[in-house]
Image (cartoon, rainbow, N blue to C red):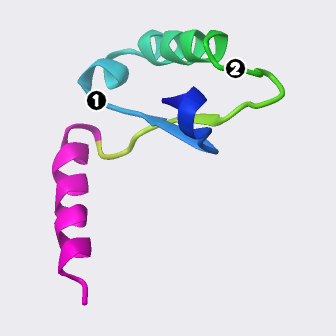
């Protein structure tokens, strides 16, 4: 996904990522090794703040955007 849309920020979340800092650090390391043009292109990796509520919050926001007139 990173190589396709080239985001400025990559937010990693979920119970596994928040379980231990080593998991988060390993995920970033693997992502960087598989990112094309790294380090020339280097997105900012951050840990999500919503944890388990992220999916429900995202779904609610999508519904609210659909209702906008």
Residue at 42 percent across and 12 percent down: it is 23
Q: Dot 2: what SS?
A: loop
- Residue 38 is marked as none
The C terminus lies in which quarter of the figure? bottom left
Category of crowding for the residue at label 1, using alpha-carbon neighbours closer than 10 angstroms: few (below 14), some (14–19), many (at least 20):
some
- State the residue position of label 2: 36
Residue 49 vs residue 2: left or right?
left
Let me know if residue 57 is in the magenta part: yes
Tell me which corner region of the image, top left, top right, bottom left or bottom right, holds residue 38: top right
Relative image position of residue 19 (x, y in whole percent)? 31, 18
Label 2 vs label 1, nearer the camera: 2
Q: Is residue 48 above or below residue 15?
A: below
What residue is at 64 percent from the left and 45 percent from the top? 8
Instruction: Indicate the position of residue 1 as horizontal and vertical percent values.
Output: 48, 29
Characterize the local packing of mark 2: few (<14), some (14-19) or many (20 or more) Cα atoms within 10 angstroms. Answer: some
Q: Which residue is mark 1?
A: 14
Magenta span covers which residues? 51-69
Whether 29 is among the magenta residues is no
């Amino acid at each position: 996904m990173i190589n396709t849309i080239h985001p400025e920020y990559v937010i990693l979340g979920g119970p596994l990522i928040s379980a231990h800092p080593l998991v988060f650090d390993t995920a970033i390391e693997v992502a960087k090794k598989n990112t094309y043009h790294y380090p020339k292109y280097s997105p900012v990796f951050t840990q999500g703040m919503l944890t388990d509520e992220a999916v429900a919050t995202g779904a609610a926001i999508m519904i609210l955007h659909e209702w906008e007139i």
